Image: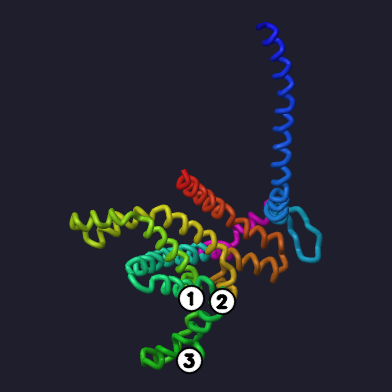
Amino acid sequence: MAVGRTAGVPAVRRRAPSWGRARRREAGTALLFLLPLFILVVGLIIYPFYRAIWLSLTDKLVGYPERFVGLRNYAYLIADDTFHEVVKNSLVFTVASVALKVVTGLAMALVLDNLVRGRNFFRGLFLLPWITSTVIIALTWRWMFDAFPGRGFFNSVLLDMGLLNRPIAFMATPAGAMAAVVVANWWRAFPFFGVSFLAGMQSIPRELYEAASVDGASAGRRFWHITLPGLKHVIIVTTLLSFILTINDFNIIYVMTRGGPGTATQVFATYSYEVAFNQLRWGRGVTISIFAVPLLVIGIALISRYLLRGSR
């Protein structure tokens, strides 16, 4: 018996190196497959972000070499009244647009959820704004808010109905221009909320509604106590996603108003473009965009938290 035990020891020792080699070979294979993704992340995310941070610390002018200035660009923007207006405009534009999307998305989902016939047809119809080109949407809404009677849709209708004596220059005032870009952004994106909320509603067990109806709960109480709690996570995730996309919106505002009148509709994206490409100050233009990064990081972190909580 002792001989058998002694003979078995070298066999175990002989297997150990082969097991270690197999593990190293698997690790090498895994790294080989991950290498393209690593190169993609470094090339498209890490390096551009590093360059953006570096440019924000320089006084980079087009045609001139970079000159390191430290935090001077940040200090300048913190003291700049125009940038304060840009921050306020960005928050007003984003909060107003997202709030409208949530409300109309809920209304759209409720209507489609109660449709017995034609639900798929109307779902596809409501998705038209979402799949239409952003530039086309911006040009269309700019035409609709135009002040000329023969060109602007709203002015033409109101004048023909006798509700106006003269055209209203909607986009010539700060409040009117902001309302116009908010409406255009809302109209384009509310179908995303509606479809997302509809999917969430259809996942809520119908037995809950039937039990509430038997107990005498009204439609409003069923919506408040069953539908909204059931849509809680969907509402949070879609709202955060829309917040990230809306605060970075460039096309609608640039096509419709170019940030005007004055700076009434300048937001982070348009003002960064204005400073970087029209004033040719790349360092300061990049700095403007970086000021929005903390808000985006917070939004992404919250989305990740809710998604991971849902997967558990």
Residue type at mark 1 is: Ala
Query: Horizontal placement of 69 versus 201: left or right?
Result: right
User: Within 10 Å of the Cα at label 2, are there few (<14), some (14-19), or many (20+) other Cα atoms?
Assistant: many
Q: Could you give the CA–CA distance between mark 1 and mark 3, rounded to whole angstroms?
A: 17 Å
> Closer to the camera, 211 or 136?
211
Which residue is denoted by mark 3 in the rendering?
149
Magenta highlight on residue 147: no
Does residue 70 show up? no
Toward which corner of the image does residue 200 lie, by quadrant? bottom left
Please give the range of residues in magenta. 70-88
Query: Residue shown at 41%/66% (left/top)?
Result: 105
Residue type at mark 2 is: Thr
Q: Which mark is residue 257?
A: 2
> Closer to the camera, 111 or 290?
111
Q: Could you give the CA–CA distance between mark 3 and mark 2, rounded to whole angstroms?
A: 19 Å
| Lower position in the chain sequence, tag 1 or tag 3 | 3
Toward which corner of the image does residue 4 lie, by quadrant? top right
Q: Could you give the CA–CA distance between mark 1 and mark 2, rounded to whole angstroms?
A: 9 Å
Q: Residue 214's x, y, as percent?
A: 19, 56
Q: Which mark is residue 94?
A: none
Residue type at mark 3 is: Pro
Residue found farthest to the top: 2
Query: Residue shown at 68%/51% (left/top)?
Result: 41
Which residue is denoted by mark 1 in the rendering?
180
User: Within 10 Å of the Cα at label 1, are there few (<14), some (14-19), or many (20+) other Cα atoms?
Assistant: many
Image quadrant where one finds the N terminus: top right
Circle 1/circle 2 CB separation < 8 Å: yes
Q: Is residue 174 above or below residue 193?
A: below
